[in-house]
Image (cartoon, coloured by chain):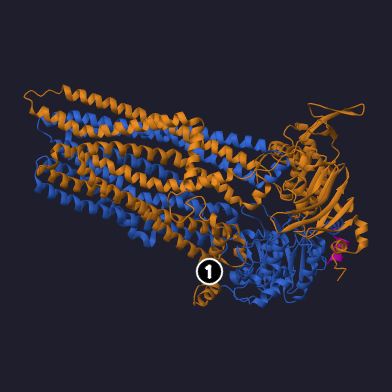
């Protein structure tokens, strides 16, 4: 995991390498400055020596400038390195995800990917920046300052050795004690957010059932939990500064007492005593800082692990070595195909089907009968477990993926439009489509309503297509697929929100595109009854194949569905 | 893949690439749409971060929260902070004193006597102990104050949210409201628990150190002040730059997050259209921008530390040199010991100054968040001036009398005590309506439903079907005309009671995290287990619930992701059934479910409609077939009305919809 993440540092490795060095420089000056400050007082001011004041002062000023330079440069390099690292990490993840097949996407869900690409990367980035700037700095300060302390007086140094474990143990106790509550708090915040979220989303339900007071009660309960947990965590954390203060001042007083004796005995000067106290503070402070780093890195560990999962996911469907780019025609053949998701049971078995180029095929079946699974094998969104799927007479696994998917356009059941203009969305189908072709496709998909939109083709579609109705969205998605001029068009229940009349117009248009194979999954018999061939699926098996009349006469399932629907049409979103 | 790559490579390089154009378009779009929402959560409204007239009232209001119940604690905390700061200064000075007043005299003694030193150390030890105690007490107090105030603000916000009209939710994007609850409240918490205490303690430190410095030497204090001014302005300048870059970073992050969210959720569509390379190209641009902004923001964010610290060091040198010169040349009556003491003091002066200047930036940013929170609290709540309430009644000898417990029959009780039996008679009289001025949605709607009748609405999207139903339960206020319910103007009925008498099944099913039983009971909290099961049976939901691992106790999430769409719909019907209202508003779902589930939903709907007045937005033929009246809506007008046979005979719009043929063409 660390190896993969570290590889994302790449071109920023020099920045990453230089940062700790600059930090060491800053630490060096930070340690030396108090030393010379003591000299300035001892040798200069106390002695009343102006020349000494000036020369030490100059040295100090130069050191301050150098320290500032080191610190500022380190800020620059650390920022470049950490932001660059995060950017590479995101970019690697994104590319990886783009190579994912449907099975991979099923495995790591969409929202999980969003968190990984956003929050998780930000957390790792922060930890990395912290690591660069502080991971060397804090121990280095401790070591440098420790050395100085030792140099000034060995006996006094013993005081720190006694104090450090006290502080360390105290901090560990406090942090581990509070950590438990902090972790609970994250869960509670999630809960709080989900109460608000559900409330806002369902505000009409809340109001319709007059449940405002109960909602407030629910919210109050969680808000109280958050309050109590926060209080507990912060009560524990409240021990932190008194602990620090006690240890610090305790050290100071003990050192003063012992120091005074040493000064009297002539083993120490007053200036050195002051520096000594200063260094002690630095040692203790850096220990604090170190504990902060450890907490932060522990917290980001979970994020790093989630990111690594993306890299561990192996894309299942890749182009074969020497792919065929030419798709001969729109014919589709299933030969003894079986299929299942992940390690689950087969949801398709013994599928044998021959669809001639240019024909219209309807697919009918209940929920879970395998309709969608079946058609997804055609553009090789999934690979069959056994048997072969052939498009244009060639096994799909031997075809170039891009070429295959461009020739077998599929309108998914879960239609998605992307934020952008209508034109942008249509161009997804074919980059270089002309305006004329776009209107042609729109008209064929009965999406002429775009003319009525403000700006026509330039009308802005919001994220997820929220500002067009369900029926309009479906028709735009069909137009987007049509514009690709595919050899095979697959409609997976793509007209469910379109009214009967408009749907029949779309069907009429489609049937005039004689060169194109049309495969239509539908809930309504009326959507497929004119097809050249209708496939009835049941429990992953082909239950019957034939024309409307044939099936009506010979297929029980088909007849049942037909009869239940034949009571009439419906009024879904008439145009 | 190679095909696509070639094409991208061959794309005209003149000007921007397609990906760049797309990014640019989306950015402009976002800006034009909601300028006030950019970079929401963080960052002040304007480009520059500073205190101005707008932020003062917000600050005042925030302090008013401290006043309510926490004033004593807050005053105590401030006092403790002052004590703490003074003691800290005192201890800082002690080291100097230690050397000058105790160690040096001992050095001059023939027989070193350490007694005075020991006493001084013990005194300081006691002071140190007090510091530890005050710091601890303070931390406890501040935690109680900040958490308490935040809880209070959260509760007030949420309660307020419940009182807002539906139109508020129409006009405020969901993410925007959420961000007020999360980011904005969080930044307020930070201000209360960190910024305000730190600024206060810094101020106390500054004042006490300042007084001590002045008492030692005026000219040297002058020099320090020059540095203070320099420190302050430098900190503000760097801080301002950093804040500006942080804002840019936030908006770059927002743009990228939106893109990621959209792409990840539509990842399957990306694959189907082989759009991977284009997506990567756009992502690359957004990612680069984010990297640049993050780098700048972080540079300015972390450069401030070393710059401030070393400015302090330079100040130390300047004071030492100038002070040394003053003392040696015998001017200003300064002793060398004074200068040493002054130097020690001046070192503890820089930190609070740069702290204050850094905190000011975060305070101003948080106040912007507080402003948004208060804006939500100041929204106008739903109007409810109705006096008539719904009461359970009993009928004895033809006369109604009010009861205390549920009887199954209800009556409207007017302000004057008059009881009118609840029957479910609904009349619209010349109703006009518009969501926003100048964009009228409904014109002159007249209709009636007698108790037990079923009225169906058909028509295209945007014709106004849903709007009509939303007016009856007063989600929105009428523009003109009136709606009568059992002869009472709905404006005169208390909103809660009006809504309690209406059942609603919405097209978008919204469930809540909890058990199945909880979700059904949402319709009526006091329903018994038997009533819940009975409602589920009526709604055809019982059989699938029984098959769930925990039955009625199965916990589902708010999105109902464990259930199918059809099952969610059945649950929402059960939820309505348990409420047992005399009038129902149904919006038939358009989502595609398989034939079997559809017939289940169908019969569930029929089941709960029986005997009730029903307004139904119809998508299915069987629904309209047995309606008492069908209203065909178009562009906000009722253009045809009558029952199924009448309307077919008219050969108008209804006929056209029904047959799927354009008869009039």
- In the rendered image, the quadrant that contains the C terminus of chain B is bottom right
Outermost residue toward the left in this view? B110
Chain A, which colour? blue
Which residue range is magenta in the image?
Answer: A547-556
Q: Residue at x 73, y 48 (%)?
A: B477
Taking the image as drawn, is residue A387 in sight?
yes
Kind of element beneath mark 1: helix
Can you identify the residue that label 1 sits on?
B19
Establish if A340 lies above or below B114: below
Q: Is residue B535 magenta?
A: no
The chain that hosts pointer 1 is B
Which residue is painted at 76% across and 42% down in the image? B491
Q: Is residue A529 left or right of residue A202?
A: right
- Is residue A555 on the magenta stretch? yes
Assess disc 1: are there few (<14), some (14-19) or many (≥20) residues with their C-alpha within 10 Å of its C-alpha: some
Please state, as top left, top right, bottom left or bottom right, where the N terminus of chain B lies in the image.
bottom right
Image location (x, y in percent) of residue B434: 73, 55
Image location (x, y in percent) of residue B159: 62, 38
Image check: A80 left or right of A418?
A: left
What color does chain B have in the rendering?
A: orange
Q: Is residue A363 above or below residue B605?
A: below
């Amino acid at each position: 995991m660390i190896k993969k993440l570290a590889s994302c540092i790449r071109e920023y490795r020099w920045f990453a390498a230089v940062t700790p060095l600059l930090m060491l420089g800053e630490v060096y000056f930070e340690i030396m400055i108090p030393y010379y400050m003591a000299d300035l007082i001892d040798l200069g001011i106390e002695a009343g020596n102006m020349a000494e004041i000036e020369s030490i002062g100059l040295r100090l000023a130069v050191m301050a400038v150098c320290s500032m330079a080191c610190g500022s440069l380190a800020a620059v390099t650390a920022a470049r390195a950490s932001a660059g690292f995060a950017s590479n990490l995101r970019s690697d993840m994104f590319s990886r995800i783009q190579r994912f097949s449907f099975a991979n996407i099923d495995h790591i869900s969409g929202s999980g990917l969003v968190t990984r690409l956003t929050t998780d990367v930000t957390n790792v980035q922060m930890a990395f920046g912290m690591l660069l700037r502080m991971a060397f700095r804090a121990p280095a300060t401790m070591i440098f300052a420790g050395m100085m302390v030792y140099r000034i007086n060995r006996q006094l140094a013993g005081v720190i050795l006694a104090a450090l474990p006290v502080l360390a143990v105290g901090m560990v106790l406090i942090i581990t004690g509070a950590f438990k509550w902090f972790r609970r708090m994250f869960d509670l915040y999630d809960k709080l957010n989900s109460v608000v979220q559900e409330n806002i989303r369902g505000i009409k339900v809340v109001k319709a059932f007059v449940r405002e007071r109960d909602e407030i009660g629910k919210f109050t309960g969680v808000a109280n939990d958050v309050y109590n947990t926060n209080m507990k965590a912060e009560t524990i954390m409240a021990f932190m500064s008194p602990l620090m203060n006690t240890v610090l001042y305790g050290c100071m007083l003990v050192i003063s007492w012992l120091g005074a004796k040493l000064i009297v005995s002539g083993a120490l000067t007053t200036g050195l005593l002051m520096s000594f106290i200063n260094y002690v503070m630095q040692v203790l402070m850096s220990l604090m800082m170190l504990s902060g780093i450890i907490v932060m890195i522990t917290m980001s560990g979970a994020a790093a692990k989630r990111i690594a999962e993306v890299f561990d996911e192996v894309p299942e469907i890749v182009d074969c070595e020497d792919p065929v780019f030419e798709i001969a025609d729109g014919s589709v053949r299933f030969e003894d195909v079986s299929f299942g998701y992940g390690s689950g049971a087969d949801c398709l078995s013994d599928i044998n089907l021959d669809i001639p180029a240019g024909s219209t095929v309807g697919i009918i079946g209940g929920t879970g009968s395998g309709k969608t699974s079946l058609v997804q094998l055609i553009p090789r969104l999934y690979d069959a477990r056994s048997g072969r799927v052939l498009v244009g007479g060639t096994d799909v696994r031997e075809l170039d993926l891009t070429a295959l998917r461009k020739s077998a356009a599929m309108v998914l059941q879960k239609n998605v439009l992307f934020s952008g203009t209508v034109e942008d969305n249509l161009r997804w189908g074919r980059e270089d489509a002309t305006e004329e072709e776009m209107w042609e496709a729109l008209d064929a998909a009965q999406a002429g309503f775009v003319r009525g939109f403000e700006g026509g083709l330039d009308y802005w579609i919001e994220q997820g297509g929220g500002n067009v109705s369900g029926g309009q969205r479906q028709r735009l998605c069909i137009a987007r697929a049509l514009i690709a001029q595919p050899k095979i068009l697959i409609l997976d229940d793509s007209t469910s929100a379109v009214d009967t009349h408009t749907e029949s117009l779309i069907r009429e248009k489609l049937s005039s595109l004689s060169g194109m194979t049309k495969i239509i999954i539908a809930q309504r018999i009326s959507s497929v009854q004119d097809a050249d061939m209708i496939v009835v699926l049941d429990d992953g098996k082909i239950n019957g194949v034939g024309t409307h009349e044939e099936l009506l006469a010979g297929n029980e399932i088909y007849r049942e569905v037909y009869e239940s629907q034949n009571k009439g049409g419906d009024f879904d979103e008439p145009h | 893949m190679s095909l696509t790559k070639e094409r991208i490579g061959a794309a005209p390089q003149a000007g921007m690439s397609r990906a760049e154009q797309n990014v640019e378009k989306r950015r402009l779009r976002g800006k034009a749409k909601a300028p006030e929402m950019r970079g929401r959560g963080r960052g002040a409204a304007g480009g520059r971060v500073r205190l101005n007239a707008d932020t003062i009232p917000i600050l005042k209001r925030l302090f008013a929260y401290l006043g309510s119940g926490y004033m004593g604690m807050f005053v105590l905390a401030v006092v403790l902070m002052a004590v703490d700061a003074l003691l800290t200064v005192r201890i800082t000075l002690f080291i100097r004193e230690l050397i000058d007043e105790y160690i040096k005299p001992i050095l001059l003694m023939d027989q070193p006597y350490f007694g005075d030193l020991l006493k001084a150390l013990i005194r300081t030890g006691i002071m140190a102990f007090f510091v530890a105690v005050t710091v601890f007490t303070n931390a406890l107090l501040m935690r109680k104050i900040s958490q308490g105030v935040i809880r209070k603000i959260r509760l007030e916000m949420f309660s307020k949210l419940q009182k807002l009209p539906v139109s508020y939710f129409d006009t405020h994007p969901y993410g925007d409201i959420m961000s007020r609850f999360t980011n904005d409240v969080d930044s307020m918490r930070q201000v209360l628990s960190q910024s305000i205490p730190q600024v206060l303690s810094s101020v106390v430190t500054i004042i006490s150190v300042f007084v001590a410095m002045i008492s030692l030497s005026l000219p040297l204090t002058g020099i320090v002040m020059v540095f203070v001014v320099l420190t302050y302005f430098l900190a503000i300048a760097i801080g301002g730059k950093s804040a500006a870059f942080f804002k840019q970073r936030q908006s770059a992050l927002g743009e990228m997050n939106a893109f990621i969210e959209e792409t990840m959720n539509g990842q399957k569509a990306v694959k189907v259209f082989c759009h991977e390379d284009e997506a990567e190209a756009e992502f690359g641009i957004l990612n680069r921008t984010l990297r640049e902004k993050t780098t700048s923001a972080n540079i300015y964010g972390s450069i401030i530390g070393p710059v401030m610290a070393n400015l302090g060091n330079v100040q130390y040198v300047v004071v030492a040199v100038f002070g040394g010169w003053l003392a040696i040349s015998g001017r200003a009556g300064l002793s060398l010991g004074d200068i040493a003491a002054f130097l020690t003091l001046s070192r503890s002066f820089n930190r609070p100054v740069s702290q204050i200047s850094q905190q000011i930036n975060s305070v101003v940013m948080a106040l912007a968040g507080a402003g948004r929170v208060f804006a939500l609290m100041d929204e106008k709540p739903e109007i409810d001036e109705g006096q008539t309430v719904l009461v359970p009644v009993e009928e004895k000898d033809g006369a109604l009398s009010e009861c205390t417990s549920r009887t199954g029959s209800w009556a409207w009780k007017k302000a004057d005590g008059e009881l009118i039996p609840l029957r479910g008679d609904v009349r619209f009289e010349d109703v006009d309506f518009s969501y926003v001025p100048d964009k009228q949605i409904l014109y002159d709607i007249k209709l009636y439903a007698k108790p037990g009748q079923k009225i169906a609405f058909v028509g295209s999207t945007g014709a106004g079907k849903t709007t009509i139903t939303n007016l009856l339960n007063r989600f929105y206020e009428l523009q003109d005309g009136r709606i009568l319910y059992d002869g009472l103007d709905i404006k005169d009925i208390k909103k809660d009671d009006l809504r309690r008498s209406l059942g609603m099944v919405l097209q978008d099913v919204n469930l809540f995290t909890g058990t199945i039983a909880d979700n059904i009971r949402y319709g009526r909290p006091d329903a018994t287990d038997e009533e819940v099961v009975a409602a589920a049976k009526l709604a055809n939901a019982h059989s699938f619930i029984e098959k769930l691992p925990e039955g009625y106790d199965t916990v589902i999430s708010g999105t109902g992701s464990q259930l199918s769409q059809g099952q969610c719909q059945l649950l929402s019907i059960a939820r309505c059934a348990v409420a047992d209202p005399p009038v129902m508003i149904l919006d038939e779902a358009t989502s595609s479910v398989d034939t079997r589930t559809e017939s289940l939903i169908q019969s569930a709907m029929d089941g709960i409609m029986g005997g009730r007045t029903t307004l139904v937005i119809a998508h299915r033929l069987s629904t309209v077939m047995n309606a008492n009246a069908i209203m065909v809506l178009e562009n906000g007008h009722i253009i045809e009305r009558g029952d199924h046979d009448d309307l077919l005979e008219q050969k108008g719009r209804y006929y056209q919809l029904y047959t799927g043929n354009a008869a009039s063409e």
